[in-house]
Amino acid sequence: MSRPARILGRWLLFAICGLAVASVTGRPASSSPPGRRAAAPSTAGSTITTRSTTTTPPGTRAKGTPRAGARTVATAFAAAYARYLQSALPADRLPACSPAARAIVTQSGPLPARLAIRQLRLTAVNGARGSWAARFAILDRRGRGEVSAELVLTPTPTGWEVAEVVGPDLDTLLAPPTRDVRPTGPPAARRVALEFTDSYLAYTYGHAGIEALRDLTRKLPAMLGQQPPRVPEGIRRLDPRVASLALSPRGTEWLAGANVTDGRNTYQVISVVGRVGGRWLVVALGPGG
C-alpha cells in the first residue's frame, strides 16, 4: 500500500473512533486543543432559580438558636422596668413583653413625680418558671425603702414572655409615714405582768405551789388558794409559755393581755397592773385569768 493510502486510512480510523465516543457520552467531541479548558457557558440574560430547603415555620425559633431561660427573661424585663418606673424608658421598649402586659404597664404608668424618687435600683429577682418577684431599692425624699413588682411569665414557641405585671403598691408609697401610736405601757408594769403570768402558769399547770406566785397584792394569793387547781397528769406534762403580751391603759392602771400557748391550746391570761405603795403589782385578774 502506498504512503498516501496509509495516511488516509489512519484519518478515517480516528474519525470513526470520535463518532463512537460521542454516541456513548451524548456530547459532541471537543475540538479544543489538548491542555486548554473549555470556557464555561454564559448565563447572561438567563434566570437561575433555587428552591429553599428551610422547613422552620414563620415566627418560630430557628434551629440552633439558644432559647433564653425564664430567669434571664425575668431579670432583663425587671431591669428595664426599673427604668420605665423612673420615666427613663418607654413602655414599647420593655423586652419580652406581651401586648397584655404592656397594656397593664401603660395603665399603671411610671411612678408619680410627686414621690420625688431620686434612685430606683433592681436588687433581686426571685422565682421559678412562670412566677417571679422583682425587688427594687428606692431612695426618695423620706429616705431609703424597698418596693417590689410581681411578674407572670408564660412559655411561647419563641421563648418565655412576660404575660402580666403587678407594679409597686402606690398606696404604700404615697401614704405619709405614721408612728405606732399604740401605747406600750411603762416598762416596769410590763415586766411585772410578764413575771406574774409566768408564775401563774406554773401554778395552774401544777408545776409549782401557790407560794411561787410573784408580783401580786396580798389578797390575791388568799383568793386563789380558796380554789386550788386540780391538774390532770396530761395537763401537767404540757409546757405553757407566753407568746406575746400587750398593755392597754385603764385609768391609772394597765390591762395586761398575755397570749399563752401550751402546744395543745392557745388562750389569754388577763391581769390588771397598778401602783401600790410606790411599786407596780398585779391588783386583779381578768376574765381569762
Image (spheres, rainbow, N blue to C red):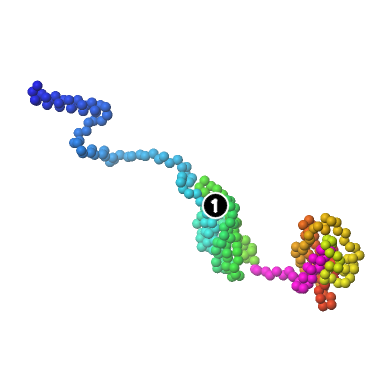
Name of the residue lying farthest toward the bottom: 278
From this viewpoint, is residue 98 visible?
Answer: no
**Looking at the rendering, which quadrant does residue 110 occupy?**
bottom right
Residue 273 locus on image (x, y percent): 81, 71
Residue 32: give x, y in percent of width and height.
Answer: 20, 35
Instruction: Report the side of 72 relative to 253 (left or right).
Output: left
User: Residue at point 51% right, 62% down?
Assistant: 88
Report which residue position mark 1 lands on. 70
Residue at x 53% of width, y 50% of height: 160
Residue 233, image x, y percentages = 84, 56
Locate residue 20 relative to residue 77 in the image: left or right. Answer: left
Please tell me which residue lies in front, 214 or 150: 214
Q: How many marks?
A: 1
| Residue range corresponding to the magenta coloring | 176-203
| Secondary structure predominantly adopted by residues drawn in magenta | helix
Which residue is farthest top? Answer: 1
Q: How far from the left and from the top, in percent, is residue 127?
A: 59, 54
Give the class, few, some or many, for how many residues have Cα within 10 Å of label 1's Cα (few <14, many ≥20). Answer: many
Residue 74 in which image quadrant: bottom right
In the depicted structure, whether residue 288 falls above or below residue 58: below
| Residue 44 placement: quadrant | top left
Residue 17 in magenta? no
Left or right: 70 in relation to 266: left
Taking the spot 64% from the left edge, 66% from the top edge, the residue there is 175
Residue 200 vertical position relative to residue 56 in the rendered view, above or below: below
What is the secondary structure assignment of the residue under circle 1?
Answer: helix
Q: Amino acid at mark 1?
A: Ala
Q: What is the quadrant of the C terminus in the image?
A: bottom right
Question: Could you tell me which residue is drawn at 58 percent across and 56 percent down?
Answer: 126
Which quadrant is home to the N terminus? top left
Of 188 and 27, which appears nearest the observer?
188
The magenta stretch spans residue 197: yes
